[in-house]
Image (cartoon, grey):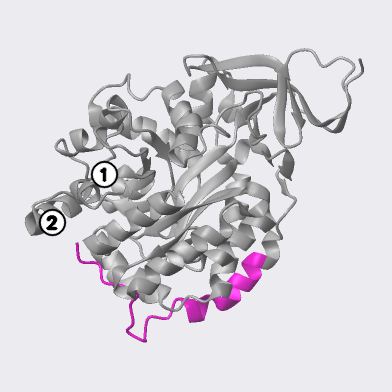
Amino acid sequence: MTQSPADLLITGCTALVHDGQEEIEFFENASIVVRDGVIDAITDDVRGLDAVEHIDARGQVAMPGFINCHTHSPMVALRGIAEDLPAEEWFNDYIWPIESNLTEKDVELGARLACAEMIRAGVTCFADHYFSMGTVAAVTAESGLRAHLGQAFFSSQGAQGRERSLEFALRYRGGADGRITTALAPHAPYTVDDADLAATAELAREHGLPVHLHASESRDQTDNSLARHGLTPIEVLERTGLLDTELLIAHGTGIIDRDLPVLERATGQVAVATAPRGYLKFAWDPTPVRALREIGVPVGLATDGAASNNSLDIWESMALTSLVQKSAEGDPRWLTSRQALHHATLQSARAVGLGERIGSLARGRRADIILVDLTGPHTQPVHDLAATLVHSARSSDVRTTIVDGRVLMRNRQLLTLDLPSTVRELGERLPALVDRGHGRRIQEYDT
């Protein structure tokens, strides 16, 4: 019986796959067959199979698209605006005054620039936590990316902030042909009071929504919370019921030993997103990835916003996670390259609640695929392919980015976004955006 043509056929690649124990393996001279946005087969024999679109990927590695588990995409407009500062000055003197100037157009242009950067870096899904998220959802749909979106709120906004977060989550859930998932997005325990956190947990359970927030971002935050409340931020999340929900915690560098049994007994699906470059800049401790792994909490990779991280390069986050963890643990055997690849793929997919749909190349998974060229001098010779991908390859080695079987970038050419016009228009708006002369702030950083 003759098969109908596939929608997309990728041939001649080396495919990164997971075995039954979730260990990383490499399938050489593989072909990937895509139908209806889903991987139909990974095989070494496609004789007689036709396809509407064919990509010859000889010399390239096919990988699951990377997931940026925590960012603030419109903040690329503030890249480099506040450098070499402690967190309280960074927020109070620069970021929150500037963010009071934000218009929906600024958010749109920033999100579009961020999506272009992420597509070019091989990110196929991102978890965003910001304002004017309806605009970010529209840009997500335009770009072709997958996204997990939450409308941020503070208690200083009153009940309306929480209500707008819920309204957004319900309205946009399943948008962009199913590529958008949504979450409730309280900012953090130090800007959202216990009553609002508890109400958020109730709403999450009532509507079947996950929650995405910052918590235990630094050891200072944890120490200040203990001094003020006698509880760590993680214990505040438990007291308010958020650990009974599907919860994504951004950063967690301030998680301490007494938090680990609290997280282990959580009845909800709790995950942590780590963004090591920003922690190095703020002189924070690293996320305790090993301790979290030992209690079964998945840790996904992230960049945070480009205002603090200067980059949305998840490849750098992957390499830094491996290196920083080696240093923090005093053990060169942790994290290995294969473990880092697992964090960048399947663990990150689980962190954003999509572990059954994306994060690995396998039959039935959504066809979120990147092709990485390893023919450059900086990636040759290849003795250990996992180490080459983690420690030698760069985001610029990504040649092709595919989401739901649709090619968003081919041979480094963006196909869904107009990058030059975005950069030009954003540049014209920057003087008004970065003005701090008005003396306003959207919030006070006081942990």
The answer to whether residue 43 is seen in the rendering is yes
Q: Amino acid at mark 2?
A: Asn
Q: Residue, x 45% and y 79% (percent of image)?
A: 101
Depth order, front residue of 62/229: 229
Q: Mark 1 = which residue?
A: 253
Q: Position of residue 54 (x, y in %)?
A: 83, 31
Q: Determine the CA span between mark 2 and mark 1.
A: 14 Å
Q: Position of residue 3 (x, y in %)?
A: 88, 21
Depth order, front residue of 121/112: 112
Q: Mark 2 = which residue?
A: 224
Q: Earlier in the sequence, mark 2 or mark 1?
A: 2
Helix, strand or loop at mark 1: loop
The answer to whether residue 79 is seen in the rendering is no
Q: Is residue 103 magenta?
A: no
Q: Is residue 399 above or below residue 105?
A: above
Tell me: 268 left or right of 121.
left
Depth order, front residue of 131/61: 131
Q: Quadrant of the N terminus?
A: top right
